[in-house]
Amino acid sequence: MVAKTMDQLVSLCKRRGFIFQNADIYGGMQGVYDYGPLGVELKNNLKAAWWRSMVYERDDIEGLDAAILTNRKVLHYSGHEDTFSDPMTDCRKCKGRFRADHIKDGKCPNCGSTDLTEPRPFNLMFKTTVGPVDNAENLAYLRPETAQAIFTQFKNVVDSTSRKLPFGIAQIGKSFRNEITPRNFIFRVREFEQAELEYFVMPGEDEKWHEMWKEARIKWWEEQGLPREHINIYTTPKEDLAHYAKACYDIEYQFPHGMEELEGIANRTDYDLGNHTKGQDELNLTSHCHPNSDSTTKLCIRDDESNSWVVPFVIEPSMGVDRGVLAVLTEAYEEEDLGEGNSRIVLKLKKHLAPIKVAIIPLKKNNEAIMNKCHEIKQNLLKLGIGRVALENTGNIGKAYRRHDEVGTPLCITVDFETIENQPESVTIRDRDTMEQHRVNIADLPTYLREYFLG
Ligand code: GAP
C-alpha cells in the first residue's frame, strides 16, 4: 500500500467535492473551510453515528442544541476569559506572530530572526457585539466549546426530564477559536464542530466513569473504521491539564502529520456547575470556584439516597467532528496497484459513513428505456432510507466506477440492455472493495440492500 500524505487527501477533497478552502475566490481565509457536496454527507453521517450511539442507543442521555452566541458572564465564570489563552511571541523583524511553543532555538519560524518579544498571553475567543451599540456592556463571544451551554442549561434539563444521576447531555455544534497558527488542513481550524457529552455522576464515582467512557469511546472509533493500532491513549500530565480538569485522556490518531489528538475525555469535576452557581459555600464543592455573584440558580440535583443536594462531577468525552472526518478519510484512503500499469484510488469508508450509498449507472447515455428504469430503481431505493442514492448519466461505466471508488460509494448498480429486455429484470451490482460483480433480480434489490446497509 502507498503511504498517505496530507497533500493526497487535500487534493482528493478538492477534486471530488469534499472540502474547499473558504472564500477561495478571494484567496481564502486561513483556518476556515467549507464542506462540499460529498463532505457535508460524510460529516452528517459521522455526526449521526455519534448521536445514535449517545442519545438513541443509551437510555441515560438527553440531547441539546444551544446557541453559539454566548453571554459574556458564562465565559467569565467558566474561567475562559482569564485562562483560555496561548502564550505568543512577536517577531520584530517580519512582524509575524507565533505560538511560543512553536519557536525553535529562539528563531522566528518565518524569517529566522532572533529579535523576538517575550511570550504574552493571547485569548483565543472571538468577540462580537450584540445589538447596535459597540460597547463593553454588549460584548458577547462565539462559544469556544459547546460544553458551557450544557452546564448553564443543566437545571432546565433536569427539571424537564426528571433525570437522576448518572445521566448525560449531548450536543453537536460549532465552536470558534482564534487559533494563532491554524494548520494541517481541517485538523486545527478557527471554526469547527464539536460533539460533546457532559456525563453527570456522583462525586466519588467520577474515576470509575472516566475509565468507562475512555473504553466506550475507543470502541466507537473502531466502529468508524479506525483500527486500534492507529489509536494511542495519552494521559495528560497534571501540569498540562485545562484549567477545569482533574484528569484527561486524549484519544490520539495516526494522522498523516503525526499521532495527534482526535478527542479529549476529561474529568471536569464539579468545577463548571460550581462556578455557575451562586452561594457556593453551602454546597460542599471540591473545586476552586469563582465567587459567583451573578447567577440566580443552584446547579445541583437531589440525591434520594442521602436526601441532600449534590453538585455532580462531570466526565466529558469531547470529539472534534472535523478531526473525525480527517481521521476516517485518512484511514479509508488507498491507492491500489491493479497490475498491468493500472491503479485506482479508493476510499474504503465504512458503509454507514459513505456519502453516496449506491450509484445507479446506465450502460448507455441518454437511452430513454434504460434511463426510465434507472429512475424507477432510484425511487424504489429511496424508500429504503439507506441514504443518498446517486443517478449517473455519463455512459462510461469504467469512469463511473473509478469516480465512485474515489468517493467511497460501496455499491454501483449497472442497468443495461439485459435489464430491460430479459425477464426477470436484473441488474449488475459491483462491490467497491472487491470490485466483484454479480447479477441481482430487481425484485430482490430491496431485501439485498436493506440487509447490506441496515442488517
Ligand atoms: N469541551 C472540552 C474541549 O473543548 P478541547 O480539548 O479543547 O476540549 C475538544 O477540544 C476537541 O475539539 C479536541 O479533541 C479536538 O478534536 C477538537 N478541537 C479543538 N480545537 C480545535 C481546532 N482548533 N480545530 C479543530 N478541532 C479542534
Image (spheres, rainbow, N blue to C red):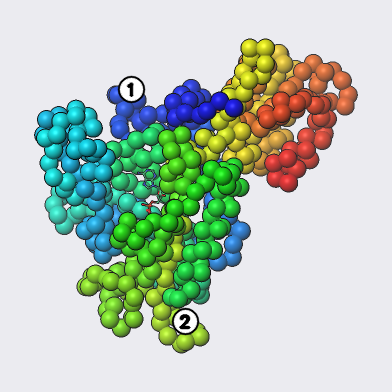
Q: Earlier in the sequence, mark 2 or mark 1?
A: 1
Indicate left or right for 227 with 84 as reference: right
Q: Nearer the viewer, residue 18 or 359?
A: 18
Place residue 78 in its image quadrant: bottom left
Q: How many marks?
A: 2
Q: Which residue is rendered at x = 33% and y = 22% of the image?
A: 25
Q: Nearer the viewer, residue 224 or 45?
A: 224
Q: Nearer the viewer, mark 2 or mark 1?
A: 2
Residue 172 lies, in percent from the top left, at 45, 51
Please, which residue is most extreme toward the front here?
A: 105
Classed neighbour count for the residue bearing mark 2: other residues with Cα under 10 Å, few (<14), some (14–19), many (≥20): some
Place residue 136 in its image quadrant: bottom left
Indicate left or right for 422 with 25 as reference: right
In the image, is residue 67 above or below residue 11?
Answer: below
Place residue 226 in its image quadrant: top right
* Helix, strand or loop at mark 1: helix
In the picture, the quarter occupied by the N terminus is: top right
Which numbered tag is attached to residue 303?
A: 2
Q: Which residue is rendered at x = 77% and y = 18% of the image?
A: 416
In the image, is residue 53 above or below residue 193?
Answer: below
Q: Amino acid at mark 1?
A: Ile
Q: Is residue 379 visible?
A: yes
Per the model, the C-alpha gap separating discs 2 and 1 is 57 Å
Label 1 belongs to which residue?
25
Residue 93 lies, in percent from the top left, at 11, 30
In the image, is residue 322 above or below residue 273?
Answer: above
Residue 307 lies, in percent from the top left, at 46, 87
Q: Nearer the viewer, residue 33 or 221?
A: 221
Residue 432 lies, in percent from the top left, at 67, 29
- Cβ–Cβ under 8 Å for marks 2 and 1: no
Q: Which residue is rendered at x = 27% and y = 40% of the image?
A: 102
Classed neighbour count for the residue bearing mark 1: other residues with Cα under 10 Å, few (<14), some (14–19), many (≥20): few
